Image (cartoon, rainbow, N blue to C red):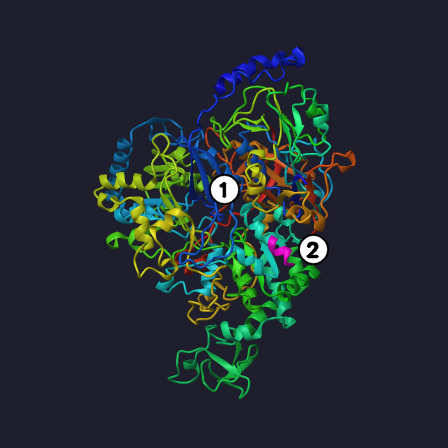
Amino acid sequence: MKRERRQFLKGLVGGSVALGLGFSGLRFLEALPAEGAVPAAEKIFRTGHNTNCDGACGHQVHVVDGRVTFIEGAGWETNIDGRAAQTFNPRICLRGLSQIQNTYSPDRIKYPYRRVGPRGSGQFERITWDQATSAIAENFQKIQTQFGRESVWIAPYTGALSLLEGVIGASFRFASVIGASAGDFEGDNEGDSAGPAAFNYMLYDPTAPANSGGLLDGHEYTDLLNAKVIFLWGNNLAETSIPDWRTVCDARNNGTKVISLDPRYTPTAAGADLWVPVRPGTDTALIDGMMNWIIQNKRYDEAYLLKYSVAPFLVHPKTKLFLKHKDLVPGGANKYVVFDERDRTIKRYDDPTLTRASLLGTHSFGGLQASTAMQVLADTMSKFTPEYAAKITDVAPETVVHLAQLYAGNHPAAIKCGFGLSHWHRGDLTHQALLTMATLTGNIGVQGGGVTIMSGALLSNAFSGLGNFWNPDGKKWVPLQPMAACDAMLFGKPYPVRAAWFMIDNYAQQMADRNKVLKALKSLDFLVVSDYVLSATAELADIVLPACTYLEKTDLLGSFNYYLQYMPKVIEPMWESKSDLDAFGLVAQKMGVGQYFQKKPDDYIKDVLAIGDPKAPESVRGLTWEQLTSGAYRLNLPAPYVPYADKKFATKSGRIEFYVESLLPYDQEVCDYKEPIEASPNNPLYQKYPLVFLSTHTRFRTHSQYANLPWLKEINNNGEGFLEINPTDARARGIASGHVVRIFNDRGWMKVRARLTEAIKPGVVNCYQGGWVTRQVKHYIEGHPNNLTHQIANPAQSIVPNFPSNAAYYDCLVQVEKAEG
Amino acid sequence: MSKRWGIAIDQNRCIGCWTCAVACKAINNQPLGTYWNRILTSRPNENAPTTAPATLAIDVPHGTFPDVQLAYQPTSCQHCQNAPCEKVCPVNATFRREDGAILVDFERCIGCRYCMAACPYGVRTFTWGEGQYAPEFAVGYGKDYRSAGRLVFTPQRPIGVAEKCTLCVERIDVGKQPMCVDACPAGARVFGDLNDPASAISVSIQQQGGRQLLSELGTDANVFYLPVSRPNKVRS
């Protein structure tokens, strides 16, 4: 009927004006739907968007005739135990709304394929699932026999971030039962692990098995309402965590000040009360400058420091380790010591005669002088006068002081970072500095305070059955992080990796030092990629498997906030796509371990959440299956969730350790600013490559996902990448807006058009990451931002088993020139 | 007193994310290249030029680094009390409901596009031929909607008809809010009755000093913009 109307109109349009008014009102007479026609019934499902986005939005999905017709933000329920939680608004953004285009995209991989041409030639032939899974099983077995079981690397990364699929999921179960190596579930070192590493240095003991090698915990986003000042530190929240911006604005209505520190005038900076364009990579020096002012002006929280931090503990002047009672007294206890101001003696910190421990000062023992950890910090910070900090950071001395006053003078003060600060070689040091400053001012474990990277951890405390899910019958995978995997492929170290299976992970373009990565992938004997689009990585595969989008499979989203979002299978999988869980089941069967993949998704979810088990963790105790599948229920946690609220820290001392003994070998025990490994004006390379190259996130993609969606593309320069460059830098190179430019360094180069903008600091350029570089789709004229980046990791991070390395995407120097084209 | 529906857009909250525009596109099944709602930029509290292409260089600020400024101005039909489009329509296809919604009667529109010339906000669109849709099937509200017997929405965008924001009358008539208001992740949009001085929209306009775009033309729009007010703006 509708179709007829359109054809009717099409025929009429040309003549309508000439025919004048006579026809008005006639055109629809033929085309109206028949009276009484019953529209197809609409069903509404609630699910969670399990992409790698800390929005973790709930989606209300409208389905008519088995097809999704609309997606909108979904509501949130109360706590599992019925206690009323605070009101949470439905959340969605332009990316979430566009998911309907993602599921019905013509770019979807519809069937399994086998490579028939040379690797990367894009020549594939369609095969059956049976053929594909047989090929995977045979090749994996052959390679494992020849090179060792860990020579098969399973790489579930963050394209999907839910319980069964993707980065937490069933892939680890699969890797465990076949004894393969795999990337770690939260040790994603693709540039996101430097921040978490610092949390582990200072707030946990990463070597303690109870801490499982790495933890990270953030304040719930609604806690921003309790802050008196919010520092959005290198965090373009208004573009990358859009729904959180509402909370920032609500906080501002209460008088909260909002500060944005960023070398770019982002939408966040535009919306802030104060924008501080800091020289990229020097944030630690700025924080140190602020801390020095705070210490010099005694604006620290002495009581908090004495009670909850290692501040009063004395440090051995020779070993630099904490001085212990046994160092003073033969047969003494292995206990920290402090200086008692009343009787002016050194004694155990838990000595009942202790009246008042000295916060600052240097005290004699056995002919040596021992300073308190606080004194060590104060001495280290003392060189960071406002003028000295200003020289390094390009932030005016008075602004350094102003920032320190704002932070120390408004309690509680919240620091929210994203992963921008993490994309540096010494990103761990910067977070160490932020946490130290938060400790000085009594902001850790306090409502409205803290340093937050993600507003919600991966809920490992709720997933009590995760261990058994990952490691059935005690079988374990071998941890191998993405950067290390690259070396294992290329150099066979620490062992050869000869085959890999990626799940919605675009390693071939999203990992730093892309030329190295491509070489590594091309060196593999066998490569499997499951994805829902033919990504740059899938193009290189021997076997390509059609994956489901989040609407086509059953899963559980329990990340980035404190809700459990059951993800029902909203529609049947399109074409021949399958969930990862189903794909693993088929391959496992053929590898003789099919018994580990016999259950249905719902049963795995029940197991992991210990539903119905009276001994389930307190956070999920009492949760019923009916609750889980009828809405998003909040864990039994106070709202807003504040980490470390009990001021218990799983460190060796049980206190916040801003003096980190285990970092002594790396000269990083306190947060003394060190220069970026590359992007520093003092680097000789700077003479050749004088521009800091950023490759930031845009609101139009989530990493490389959704770069192909028309609704998003048409707002975003039709998807074409561009280089943001300050007109000063552009003029010096004869570059005007729209010119094709070549961006290059010793590692590689790329070409895009220039966009001149005053929104970027001179000396800094930016090209949004995540555009596609496939044979069919090129969002950059040539190359990709990761052709320029490197894989040089800070060895200090190796003390945290789950976050041992970090890709420093932004710690990168380039030169830009006008190019032909 | 009858209702006078309006939307207040808080430019102090708006971050130009385009979620409202995509929500509008999705609920109304607009073809590629068509936006009933688009986000323009300007200096704070100035009118953005409505003739500029909306989708180019969307985050480029005004001024010189670091002395730069930027405000986002989502712009769709302003639902004027004194609507130029209504006046020029030769067939009374564009009409104003008593509650302030300006609508187009698809069955009367002859596609002359006088209204598009008359609209000072450049918010009307026209479907010339078979549009390109992704996905190919109709998404969004998905049904015809009639207001007082007049056809004001169809699931497919009709060819040869001038269209624009309908204030989501199919939603507001059943007590919901326009989709852009529901979807705004920043809480930057307030929908309500301008005739009710106690409504959230009236209060926000009164307290924050809402302004109408191009008010000097006398259009008396029902869309108000709440000004950017960011105290303590300090540069380094």
Residue labelled with disc 2 = B236
Q: Amino acid at mark 1?
A: Thr
Residue A770 is at least partly visible in this image: no
Residue lying at the far right of the rendered structure: B216
Q: Specify the quadrant that holds the C terminus of chain A.
A: top right
Q: Amino acid at mark 2?
A: Ser
Q: What span is colored magenta in the figure?
A: A250-258
Q: In whole angstroms, how far apart are the C-alphas of marks 1 and 2?
A: 31 Å
Residue labelled with disc 1 = A702
Point out residue A465 in the picture as x, y percentages from the top left corner. Answer: 31, 55
Q: Tag 1, which secondary structure? A: loop
Residue at image point 45% right, 61% down? A200
Residue at image point 54% right, 20% down? B130
* Nearer-the-camera pick, A229 or A362: A229
Q: Tag 2, which secondary structure? A: loop
- In screen coordinates, is A637 left or right of A731? left
- In screen coordinates, is A145 left or right of A333? left
* Nearer-the-camera pick, B118 or A271: B118
Point out residue A360 in the picture as x, y percentages from the top left corner. Answer: 57, 77
